[in-house]
Image (tube, rainbow, N blue to C red):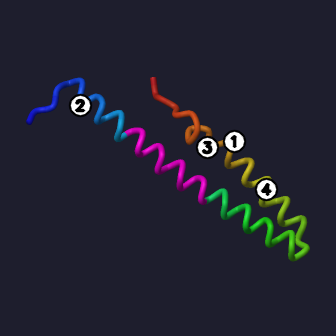
Amino acid sequence: MALTPASEALESESARLLRELEAAEVYEQKLRQVIVTVKNELAAGHHERALSMLNEALNEIDSQTDVVVPHRDR
């Protein structure tokens, strides 16, 4: 059965959304791991290292806005 242009567009959009969701899940897992690691550093009394890790995470969040808001080339 041949796909119509409308069904091809819908399938393409679905695939794009699935890729974005998978990327967001990977990003979430990475951030959760940072939180666990920072908690461990704080518990060990390594406050400076924990703060440094949080600053690194914030810098990465700032540079990864395309995970939340896709950037489309013009």
Q: Which of marks 2 and 4 is in front?
A: 2
CB under 8 Å between discs 3 and 2:
no
For label 4, the crowd category at 10 Å Cα-Cα, with few meaning under 14, some 14 to 19 and many 20 or more, is some
Task: State the SS at label 4.
Answer: helix
Q: How far is the residue under mark 4 from the one under mark 1?
A: 12 Å
Q: How far is the residue under mark 2 from the one under mark 1?
A: 34 Å
CB under 8 Å between discs 2 and 1:
no
Q: How far is the residue under mark 3 from the one under mark 4?
A: 15 Å
In terms of sequence position, does the residue under pointer 3 or pointer 2 come before the other? 2
Q: How far is the residue under mark 3 from the one under mark 1?
A: 6 Å
Q: What residue type is labelled 3?
A: Gln
Q: Quadrant of the C terminus?
A: top left
- Residue pointed to by mark 3: 64
Q: How far is the residue under mark 3 from the one under mark 2?
A: 30 Å
Q: In the image shown, does 6 or 33 lie closer to the viewer? A: 6
Task: State the SS at label 3.
Answer: loop
- Residue pointed to by mark 4: 54
Residue drawn at point x = 73 percent, y = 67 percent = 36
Q: How far is the residue under mark 2 from the one under mark 4?
A: 43 Å
Q: In this image, 7 relative to 46: left or right?
A: left
In terms of sequence position, does the residue under pointer 2 or pointer 1 come before the other? 2
Q: Position of residue 64 (x, y in %)?
A: 61, 43
For label 2, the crowd category at 10 Å Cα-Cα, with few meaning under 14, some 14 to 19 and many 20 or more, is few
Magenta stretch holds residue 18 = yes
In terms of sequence position, does the residue under pointer 2 or pointer 4 come before the other? 2
Tell me: residue 56, above or below residue 74. Answer: below
**In the rendered structure, which segment of residues is drawn in magenta?**
16-29
- Residue pointed to by mark 1: 62
Q: Nearer the viewer, mark 3 or mark 2?
A: 2
CB under 8 Å between discs 3 and 1:
yes
Q: Which of marks 2 and 1 is in front?
A: 2
Residue drawn at point x = 56 percent, y = 42 percent = 67
